[in-house]
Amino acid sequence: MFQVQCLKSATNKPTELYSKYSIGPFLKGQSTTVGNAIRRVLLSNLQGIAITGVRITGIDHEFSTISNVKEDVVDILLNLKQIVLNETGINDITEPILARLNIKKTGIITANDIELPDSITLVDPRQYIASLTTQGNLEMELLINKGQNYFTSGKLEYTIPESFLAVDAVFMPVTKVNFFVETSRNSSSFELESLILEIWTNGSVLPDEALSSSAEILENTFGLLKVTNTFSSSSSIETPVQEEKSEYLETVFIEELELSVRAYNCLKRANVHTLSDLLQYSADDLLEFKNFGQKSADEVCENLKARFDLDLQK
């Protein structure tokens, strides 16, 4: 039976949590396999929320300057990228959320000045945004989305409304993972191993929560490989493969299609968030969505085929 023991835990700052675990015992060679799998899932498959776009009053493009602000727009976008947000668990975020910032006095502007809904909290309210050098007004609208992995502003600009500037979105709650193997020999002369795993997070999730979530993802994934029907070799393999493909499609968000703002927003309003959601509809079904026209339907079909070699239902 495996044991998970926390060897060390530290909070260097609100946005940097660290824990070190010993997991085992494993037979020789197994710990490296498990360590690689857990590391990849921790860094790529856990979901988070982040600022994906910002609209600044009076600003048309990212290479602008604001007369009464110390930083230029590029610096402000970089600072917004660093802000770490967390869900409170009151309501699961299924569509983009709008937050506002309106400052009229001189001084330092921090994340704490953002007006957030009850469903979102700040991990570190002191995170710096900009400085207002003279009396004036700085007004922003921030677009917040839920996702996984990392999206550059170049990919996100297809999915945000007009007049918004795209912000590189860091959805990954785990910032760094390291592992190594310790070997020991027991009394029965079998060589056993322990996996030593180090996890750093951005504070939006605890390291032990991240480890549990990654283990659950791996359990569900490998569970699909179980062969329960031995009567037909073709049927025993076909079902797990189909289920595995379905699991994969549930993790790919429609942002990957890089649709126009109109098509993207229509799908979001219809609660279509992943490729799995989208593939439940036909092209004719999409036309029944509010404000969804033939041009948008054609765009969805073309991008789906070009990027993932998939087709909607007939």
Image: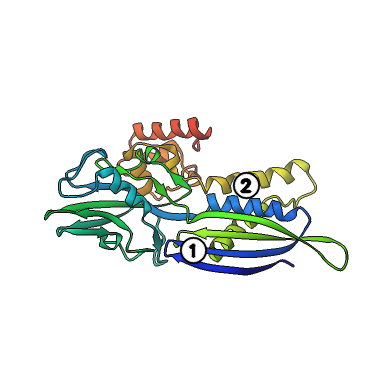
**Three-letter residue code for mark 2:** Glu
Give residue 206's position: percent from left, percent from top: 50, 65
Residue 17 disc label: 1
Mark 1 and 2 residues: CB-CB less than 8 Å, in contact? no
The answer to whether any part of residue 312 appears in the image is: yes
Residue 244 disc label: 2
Give residue 233's position: percent from left, percent from top: 78, 42
- From what the image shows, is residue 305 above or below residue 39? above
Q: Helix or strand or loop: what does disc 2 sit on?
A: helix
Q: Residue at x 36, y 56 (%)?
A: 83
Badge 2, how many Cα within 10 Å: few under 14, some, many 20+? Answer: some
Q: Helix or strand or loop: what does disc 1 sit on?
A: strand
Disc number lying in front (1 or 2): 1
Mark toward the start of the polypeptide (1 vs 2)? 1
Q: Residue at x 33, y 35 (%)?
A: 293
Quarter of the view holding residue 125: bottom left
Residue 289 disc label: none
